[in-house]
Image (tube, rainbow, N blue to C red):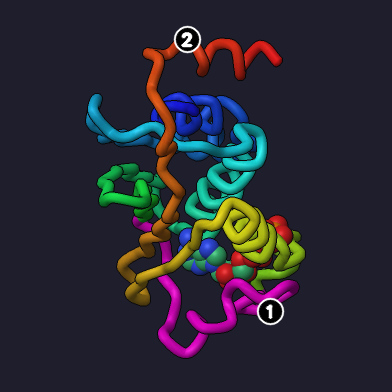
Amino acid sequence: PLRVEAVVESAMRRLPQQANDMHTQFEVNVAEDTPLIYVDKLRMEQVLVNLFTNAVRYNTQHPIIRISAHADEHFVYLDVQDNGIGIAAEHVDKLFDRFYRVDVSSRSQSGGTGLGLAICKGIMDAHGGEVHVASKLGEGSTFTLSIPRFLGEENGHEQEENHDRR
Ligand code: ATP
Ligand code: MG
């Protein structure tokens, strides 16, 4: 079992150069008592790196990424909100399809393959979780990950450290 914030923080350390070049600003607001999650750490980091990279790439201003979490009985919900260009409603259903890109003219500019979100969806599926998006064109997007809670006994953070050292 892992702390959400630990996963978020290691993903933030693995950002592409573009994110540093654009002085990406993070506002992380994850409460201390957020339930632990049971995930493959590297793969969950990959999901976050993909979302952060999109938040920077599909943005025309100083990127601000706001991360917050809430939970219910079964899931932790992690919101990744950006101040990017947003996504028109007509594209939202296809966004997680492999090779789907909204604007073909942006292809040369960014060089993406359109696999990032398909991979995110695959990884969330494998965990028994989900990924959804809410967006408004010109205002920004919020991607929400539902991540299964760790439902076993919590032995402090001892287990987490063992897991990290594996
Ligand atoms: P790759 O991630 O494989 O390098 P990609 O970024 O084009 O390529 P996805 O991450 O799957 O592929 O995203 C698909 C498309 O969804 C993008 O091409 C872009 O048009 C749109 N998109 C994704 N994230 C955002 C975002 N945060 N804001 C605006 N548009 C986005
Ligand atoms: Mg991408």
**Residue 6 percent coordinates (x, y):** 45, 24
Q: Position of residue 15 (x, y in %)?
A: 60, 35
Which of the 4 image quadrants contains residue 120?
A: bottom right
In this rendering, is residue 135 above or below 127? below
Q: Nearer the viewer, residue 23 or 131?
A: 131
**Ligand 1's quadrant:** bottom right
Residue 158 in view, yes or no: yes
Residue occupying the point 37% across, 36% down: 25
Question: Which residue does the image show at 40% across and 58% down from the upper left?
Answer: 144
* Residue that label 1 marks: 104
Left or right placement of residue 11 versus residue 62 in this view: right
Give how far across and how far down residue 18 sits, in percent: 60, 40
Q: Which residue is labeled 2 in the image?
A: 158
| Residue plotted at (37% across, 45% down) | 65
Q: Is residue 131 magenta?
A: no
Expressed as whole percent of the image width and height from the top left, the position of residue 155 reads: 40, 15
Dominant secondary structure, magenta: loop
- Residue farthest to the bottom, as pictured: 90
Instruction: Pick out the residue farthest to the front.
Output: 153
In front here: 32 or 81? 32
Upstream in sequence: badge 2 or badge 1: 1
Q: Name the element at disc 1.
A: loop
Q: For this rendering, which residue is in front, 22 or 53?
A: 53
| Mark 2 crowd level (few <14, some 14–19, many ≥20, 10 Å Cα) | few
**Residue stretch rendered in magenta on the structure:** 83-105
